[in-house]
Amino acid sequence: MGKLVVSLDGVVIKEVQITKDKTTLGRRPYNDIVIDNLAVSGEHAVLQMVGADVFIEDLNSTNGTYINGKAIKKQLLADNDTVEIGKYKIKFLLNDGGDYEKTMILKPGSGAPPNLGLGSNFGSLGAAVIGPASIKVLTGAAAGREVALTKVVTTLGKPGVQVASITKRPTGYVFAHVEGGQRPSVNGIPLTGESIALRTGDLIELAGTQMQFIQG
């Protein structure tokens, strides 16, 4: 079994466990791995699992698929290979026993609390430097729910609509836009750059839901 760690500008935005014979990757929402970026073709590439091996094949994409800096058509993936699609880097890892990220899905009107999964814990990065933090949901069906940010990367939002991530760094917590045409806002101001440092008490609005970042 392998997994893919998707990052943009050094910030991990999602992790995907490879469990199916075929895993599709592209900009269209029906792909298994959706990367909402114009540099990514609608159907960009496919990963095929053959026994213990995983192959990646470029689907005649506009901008191509690269592995470790070289353009490929179809190639067997090796442990720690880096697939490059546009500005995105996708690292292929084997035999990782960590937890796999599941996006926190916010469903308006749903009586069930959101399912929050957290990215793999890459060691104790920053654990001794920054204090614990959490996100408190203020509106919607999950209002009042507070979730601790215990892992390195937490993604939240509605896949295909609006998704953001909170990354734990040695200097603090960073909030970043992942996908969606409309950017999330912090303290009523839409996110203009790729990311912003969070401070305790900051109000986040994402996919129609308001949350508060609490640290310490």
Image: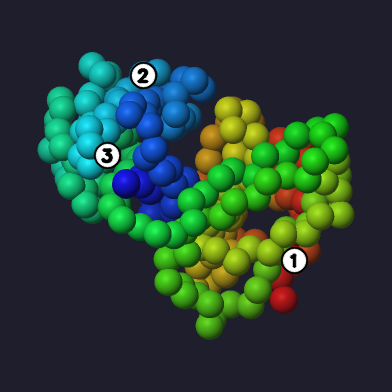
Circle 2 — which element? loop
Helix, strand or loop at label 1? It is strand
**Distance from label 3 to label 1 (Cα)?**
35 Å
Residue at x 85%, y 32% (from the top left corner) = 109
Q: Which residue is mark 3?
A: 84
Q: Categorize mark 2 by other alpha carbons within 10 Å: few (<14), some (14-19), many (20+).
A: many
Q: Is residue 83 left or right of residue 208?
A: left
Residue at 68% x, 46% y is 115
Q: Residue at x 23, y 16 (%)?
A: 60
> For the residue marked with disc 2, what is the amino acid?
Glu
Pick out the residue farthest to the front.
51
Any mark on residue 135, and which? none
Q: Quadrant of residue 207?
A: top right
Is 44 located above or below residue 107 in the figure? above
Q: Amino acid at mark 1?
A: Ile
Q: Nearer the viewer, mark 2 or mark 3?
A: 2
Q: Which residue is mark 2?
A: 43
Label 1 close to label 2 by CB (< 8 Å): no
Closer to the chain start, of discs 1 and 2, is 2
Looking at the picture, which amino acid does disc 3 mark? Glu
Residue 101 visible within the image: yes
- Front in this rendered view, residue 133 or 123: 123
Discs 1/2, front = 2
**Which percent across, then down, holds residue 190?**
68, 42
Relative placement, left or right, of 69 versus 147 is: left
Q: Which residue is mark 1?
A: 214
Return the disc, 3 or 1, that comes first in the chain's sequence: 3
The colour scheme applied to this rendered structure is rainbow
The x, y position of residue 65, in whole percent, is: 23, 30
N-terminal of the pair, mark 2 or mark 3, is 2
Badge 3 crowding class, 10 Å Cα cut-off, few under 14, some 14 to 19, many 20 or more, is many
Q: Quadrant of the C terminus?
A: bottom right
